[in-house]
Amino acid sequence: MHAFGRSLEIVLSYLLKIESVYCFRGWLSWVSDFNVAGEATMRLNDLLLGIAVMCLWGFNFSVIKLGADQIDPTLLVALRFTLAAIPAVFFVARPAVPARYFFAYGLTFGTGVWGMMTWSITVGISAGMAGLLMQLSVVSSLVLGWAWLKERLTLPKLLGAGLALAGLAVSMTLQDGSVSLIGLLFVLVAAISWSLTGIIVKKAATAEVFAFSVWGMLFAPIPLIMVAWVSQGAEVFLTLPAQMNREVWFSVFFQAYPTTLLGYWLWNRLIVSYPLSTVAPLTLLVPVFGLLGSFLFYGEAMSSTKLLACMLILTGLMVSQWRTGLFTRLFGRLY
């Protein structure tokens, strides 16, 4: 894996070429047909930027595996958020939010989402399937939003959740070693935690989402370090310095800076500049790049069963974002 970093650099550079955008523009124009008339379309530079962020987030699952295969996964996540939060908190003003929301975000985002996701990769979930199964948050978001925030259960959301669950069922039939039962349980907890982070941000009621994320990540390493200490004792900390080779440092820095700080900062910039319905479909590319990265760097097999699971989950995610009015206009004649 010594050539991993160089290979990733080459792939990223290739994906950022303008020619590659035209491969995605047909897909994006198809998605944009579902936008309400009058909404802004993305400029080419911003489209490139959005695709690059999705590429970072998708390939990040392969980079997680690179580090988690060599050091304790809990400490890998703790190092990621330590470097992401410090020194960023000294340059980003703290939002006027009670400290309990920062702690809740740090615990849920650090341990619940990325702790569980990293553990799942170490116990039998491939890097590609981890990125795909993470999209099951569309189901947990639906349930939690209805139970906690009293959000309405619309037909597109219910249909999207049903398709995602069908994809989950198909993925459980895989026999190629890319999905394990214990790993799947960890991924499901990560997906639920992802939905909980959205609720925490909403409850915090702040418009400074990026600043809130940075200050919340400051609280992420503490519970992760405690988990490592309780589960493995002092030995895991004593052996860590000898395990920190170039590949591990690359994994930590890639997760902390391009993926976390740069990625979320650019994403929030796009969210502020365009309607959410224009930007959100780009997230469908994350599991695609996740599978691509796992295929390129780890030789993950792409069977017809895996592609079917991918299609069902991504279709469910896309359908869940449709507006109720548009959905009714498209399919109203069937009722």
Image: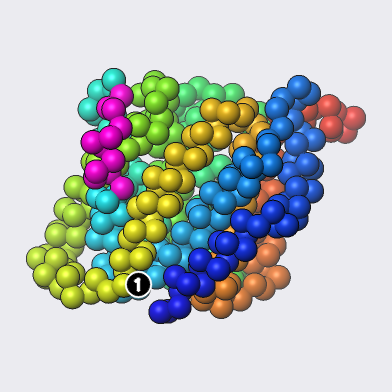
Packing grade of label 1 (10 A; few <14, some 14-19, many >=20) is some
Residue at x 32% of width, y 38% of height:
214
Q: Quadrant of the N terminus?
A: bottom left
Observer-nearest of 143 and 303: 303
Q: For residue 91: magenta?
A: yes
Q: How is the image coloured?
A: rainbow
Observer-nearest of 220 and 82: 82
Residue 134 appears in the picture as rendered: yes
**What residue is disc 1 on?**
247
Percent x, y of residue 205: 39, 21
Observer-nearest of 273 and 236: 273
Percent x, y of residue 107: 28, 42
Q: Quadrant of the C terminus?
A: top right
Residue 290 appears in the picture as rendered: no
Tell me the amino acid under the disc marked 1. Glu
Residue at x 35% of width, y 36% of height:
213
Residue at x 25% of width, y 23% of height:
98
Q: For residue 202: magenta?
A: no
Percent x, y of residue 210: 40, 33
68 sits left or right of 152 in the view: left
Residue range (magenta): 84-95
